[in-house]
Structure formats: C-alpha cells, structure tokens
Amino acid sequence: MTRRDPSEFESSVRRPDDFDEYWRQTEADTLAVPLNPRLEPVPMRSTPDVEVFEARYDSYGGLEIAGWYCRPRNIDDPLPGYLFVPGYVSEPKLPTDLAMMGYAAFSAAPRNKLRSNSVFNPGYPGLLVHNLDKRTEYGYRGFYMDAIRAFDFLSGRDEVDSSRICVQGGSQGGALTLLVSSLRAGQVACASAGAPYLCSMMDAASLTRSYPYEEINDYLRLYPEREAVARDTLDLHDIHNFVDKIECPIIVNIGLMDDVCPPETGFAVFREIGSNEKRLYTYEDCAHDAGTGVGHDKVMHAFLAEHLNPVAMSN
C-alpha cells in the first residue's frame, strides 16, 4: 500500500474547551513556587575557556530540578542565552560546545531525567502514559513547566542578555522548543525544533508502531475503555494546540523516513505555528535524525547565530 503524501495530513487533534484556562492555572501554580535558582561550580568539568556549573531550581509542585549551565570565561557580558532541551530517552548534554560558540548555555533536566528523578520517575517507556486517565495529574503537565522554568532560570541570569535567548532541541526537545516558544512568546528571540514529538499524539500512535508512541497503543490494548479519556488528556497536552502563539523566527526540520515521530505530524504542527518567520526543512532520505547527519546542524547554528550574534571563543 502506498503511503499518502505526508504534507497533506490533517491532524485529528481538538483543543479542549478549558485548554487556555488549564494552562493559565498551571502556569500560575508554577509561578507561585519561588524559582530559587542555585549554581554550584564544577571545577572537574570546567576548562580555561568555559566555566561549568551544576544548576538547580524549583518548579511545579515544588520539585527540585537540575541542569547544566556553561558560560565562556573571556567574553564580555552580556551574553546571548541558549536553552537546550532534551529528548525522551537521552539525558541532558553538558553544553560546553555551546559555551565555546559564545553562548551562556543551559541544558535542562526536567523531572524524570537524571538528577531530577528522586520524586518523579515513571521511566522510559512510561512517561508518555503516566496518569493518562487523570488529566490534571498527567506526567507531562509538570514536565512542561520544568522546561518553562529552565527558560526563566536562564533569562534571569545577570550575564545573559534577556532579549537574545534561543531554544533548541530535537524529538522531545523539539516539542519542548515549540512549547517554550509558545508560552514565552515575546521573550524567545529565535528557536529551532527538530523532529518534534508530542504532536498529534493519538494520530502518531496509529501512524507508527515504534516507541515511544507505541506506549499509547500498549495502554489502550490494556484499557480499551479509556480511549476517550486518553484522547482528552493527550489533546490537553498536545503541542499542536500551543504553537499558534509562537512569534519568534523559527526553523523546524523533519525526516521523511522518520518512524519515531511521523513526518505527517511534523507538517501538521508546522502549519499551525503562528510566527510570520518560519521555515520547514524536509530531508527525504532521513529518519529520526531529521537531517542532522547530512548537514542540518550547520544550517541550525547559522540561523541561531544570525539572530543572536554570539562571539565565539578562539581555540
């Protein structure tokens, strides 16, 4: 059977009636928790050119969240900021390479990631369907807020120019990039989202049999009577429903052979992005790497540098 053109795909996601109020209240509950940002120097990971810190802050529900913060030593303030958000299975990177490019770089470790999982740890697989039948207790509610507060952590640093902050990530990181760009519209200067996950989630579960989306199919095989409840919870947290708020220049890259995050959902979410400055890069022979193996990283870094104007360290 020939697969139809993914660019013609129409998402079945619906925006719940209480979507805006739900996220307004979620943000209010999050902001009621003092951020309490902390940095601890890590001499073992630092170099003559880059300072490395272990970061901590408090987030939704009072959970302590970790991250890595790196900044160049010998470049005058203010620095452009670079928020890196992680994939589903991968752990947050140590962003010394980004500091060498001239950025104050924060690599976030939302709940369930290493150093942020002492209280909340449903694992992988597991996170995608954690409390799926309890919409207000769904695992991604707090996870999303951890990413938002990571941006607030970075934008609040004295050495960071808050008008020059980007967000970047792939897969789950692509989803979080879209989320932060939506909920911090007017503050994010530019963004790059690769192979975005958590978009048209119920559709994706029918388009692929790969994990993580197969978690949804596993769940519904065990609890078929919960399908309507599951769809409502997923629609309430689907990135598709956020992105019309994005204002910043943004690029999105997808692989047309991706069997993890189906390209259909990438096309669909890109159409909904509200920014007037958006560009979609499609890579015909690429899968979930979404072109990173054939040169897209150079495209991405050139795009971000054009908007943020970092001063790279000399080797």
Image (tube, helix red, strand yellow):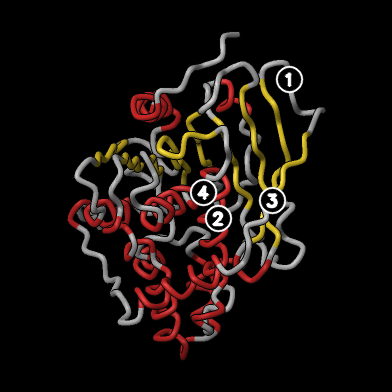
Q: Is residue 294 visible?
A: no
Using the image as rendered, state which of residue 266 and residue 255 is in the foreground.
266
| SS label for mark 2 | helix
Using the image as rendered, state which of residue 129 and residue 301 is in the foreground.
301
Label 2 to label 1: alpha-carbon separation? 27 Å
Label 1 to label 3: alpha-carbon separation? 21 Å
In the image, taking residue 136 as reference, residue 194 lies left or right, namely left
Label 3 to label 2: alpha-carbon separation? 11 Å
Label 1 to label 4: alpha-carbon separation? 25 Å
Can you tell which of label 2 and label 1 is closer to the viewer? 2
Give percent across and percent down for residue 196. 40, 51
In the rendered structure, find residue 151 and report the number of the disc placed on it.
4
* Residue type at numbered disc 2: Arg
Number of other residues with Cα within 10 Å of mark 3, as a class: few under 14, some 14 to 19, many 20 or more = many
How many marks overall? 4
Look at mark 3 in the image and give the residue it sits on: 66
Question: Quick check: marks 1 and 4 in contact, CB under 8 Å?
Answer: no
* Residue type at numbered disc 3: Ala
Q: Quadrant of residue 154?
A: top right
* Residue type at numbered disc 4: Phe
In the rendered image, the vertical position of residue 310 relative to residue 134, given as above or below: above
In the rendered structure, find residue 47 and report the number of the disc placed on it.
1
